[in-house]
Image: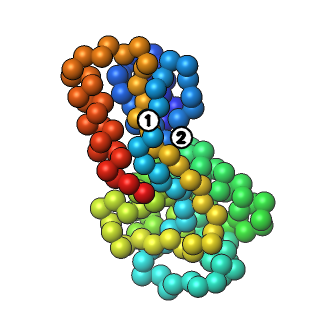
Amino acid sequence: SSAAVRDAVVDREVHFGIVVNPVPHPDLVLVELFPDAVDFFVAANEPPIDDVTQARERIATGPLVYAGRVTQMQELVAKLAGEDYLPARQLLCSDLEMVKSLALAGVGVALLPRRVAAYGQEGKLRRLHPELPFVRDVISLVYRADMHKTRAAMTLKDALVKHGKAMGP
């Protein structure tokens, strides 16, 4: 998890970490790399839904497939419950790739980060509806402020930042 990666950097177990929505820490430097968002996805072969009310009804029919450990997904599930369209059938997974596989198989509506949904499956999953709620994420590089500034460390840091920023929105 991002919290575990952040803690590993703080505890000097690793030199660098890639973290989603890092919590600031006085010993860490945070460098924003690129944005992402957790959103609702369905298999691309499902009929398109033009109306947001119909999209909510599609969610409510379920099942909703998601990784229950992910805070952003918990936030969206709470929003669904608050707006009274949380499906009775929910399938919690521990792994985002499993969520993606189930969505690709047409099992139900999946909550996934947009980059996870697109990776290796371009065009096979699509957002259920653009007016549905989603949670914005920022992916950041984290490292200790007191890290030794060796040429190797700076070369690696610069390469990670360059590659991350090149990924764009």
Tags 2 and 1 touching, CB below 8 Å: no
Q: Taking 124 as reference, is 66 above or below it?
A: above
Looking at the image, residue 52 sits to the left or right of residue 25; the answer is: right
Q: Taking 132 as reference, is 168 above or below it?
A: above
Q: Taking 166 as reference, is 110 above or below it?
A: below
Q: Identify residue type, mark 2.
A: Asn
The residue that label 1 is drawn on is 31
Residue 86 image offset from top left, x and y in percent: 70, 64
Residue 107 image offset from top left, x and y in percent: 49, 70
Query: Could you say which disc has been placed on residue 154 in the image?
Result: none
Instruction: State the residue at coordinates (34%, 59%).
Output: 119
Q: Name the mark nearer the viewer: 2 or 1.
A: 1
Looking at the image, residue 92 sits to the left or right of residue 9; the answer is: right
- Location of the C terminus by quadrant is bottom left
On the question of residue 68 being in view, the answer is: no
Task: Choose between 110 and 91: the one closer to the eye.
Answer: 110
Crowding around mark 2 (Cα neighbors within 10 Å: few <14, some 14 to 19, many 20+) is some
Instruction: State the residue at coordinates (60%, 60%).
Output: 134
On the question of residue 37 being in view, the answer is: yes
Instruction: State the residue at coordinates (39%, 31%).
Output: 17
Sooner in the amino-acid sequence: mark 2 or mark 1:
2
